[in-house]
Structure formats: C-alpha cells, structure tokens
Image (cartoon, helix red, strand yellow):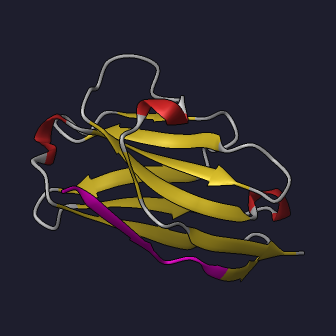
C-alpha cells in the first residue's frame, strides 16, 4: 500500500523560504509521477508542481514558476518542494500526491490515486 507522508510546513514571513518533504513508501516509484497540490481556505485545490520519478522532468503551475522547485531523491524515496520568495497568497495546506501514469493531465487532482495527509504553510505579511 502506497503511503505518502508530508513534512516541513510552518509559519514564515513573506519573502522567506520553506522546503516541504514527501516520504513515499509501499510502491515501486520509478514509473510514478509525483505532484504537489495546495488548497487555501474557501478555495479549490490547485496544482502546484509535478516531477516524473523516472527521469526527473518537472512541470509547474504559473504561480510556482521561478519561485518553487520540485525534486526527488531516489535513494530516500522522497520528493521535495523548495519554496522561495513566499507570498501571503501561498498560504494553504500543501498535499503530496502520486499517480502511476506519467501520461495524461497531471494537473488534475482526481487523476492521482494516492495522497498524503497535508502540511500547513502559512505566510505572514
């Protein structure tokens, strides 16, 4: 059974940085695509970034480009989201997700079969 456990959230001032981690277990992830999503209060869940575990290729939402970096550590079975130049509007619960296929629209949350419990990121002004 695939399990995803996020960590690294917290409170940070605008302009600061945080690194989220997602420890994955229970699967063979070389063919998986891993994504980060977020959901702010009163808003729909939105795609943030994705990485293909096999070749490390990445994609980002426009809101994340230039500020966030997604990466994976094969040895540790862990995916990271490095967030720099944080803004108040980045405040949300951040979720790690996994899908077995690298094809199709990876920005759609419903296409992911596995989710972590979420970690809160709060950016103060």
Residue at 58% from the left image edge and 43% from the top image edge = 48
Residue 6 covered by magenta stretch = yes
Residue 43 covered by magenta stretch = no
Q: Identify the magenta region.
A: 1-10
11 in relation to 54, above or below: below
Query: Residue 103, percent across and down?
Result: 32, 18
Q: Nearer the viewer, residue 115 or 70?
A: 115
Q: Looking at the image, how many numbered discs can be counted on the residues?
A: 0
Query: Residue 61, percent across and down?
Result: 61, 35
Q: Is residue 16 left or right of residue 7?
A: right
Query: Residue 89, percent across and down?
Result: 82, 57
Residue at 27% from the left image edge and 54% from the top image edge = 72
Magenta span main SS:
strand
Q: Quadrant of the C terminus?
A: bottom right
Does residue 8 appear in this view? yes
98 in relation to 41, above or below: above
Question: Residue furthest toward the top?
Answer: 104
């Amino acid at each position: 059974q695939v399990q995803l456990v996020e960590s690294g959230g917290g409170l940070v001032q605008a302009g600061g940085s945080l690194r989220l981690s997602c420890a994955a277990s229970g699967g063979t992830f070389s063919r998986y695509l891993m994504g980060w999503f977020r959901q702010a209060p009163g808003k729909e869940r939105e795609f943030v970034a994705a990485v293909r575990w096999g070749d490390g290729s990445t994609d980002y939402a426009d809101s994340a480009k230039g500020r966030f970096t997604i990466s994976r550590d094969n040895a540790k079975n862990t995916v990271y989201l490095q967030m720099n130049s944080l803004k108040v509007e980045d405040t949300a619960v951040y979720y790690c997700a996994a899908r077995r296929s690298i094809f199709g629209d990876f920005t759609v949350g419903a296409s992911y079969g596995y989710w972590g419990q979420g970690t809160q990121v709060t950016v103060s002004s």
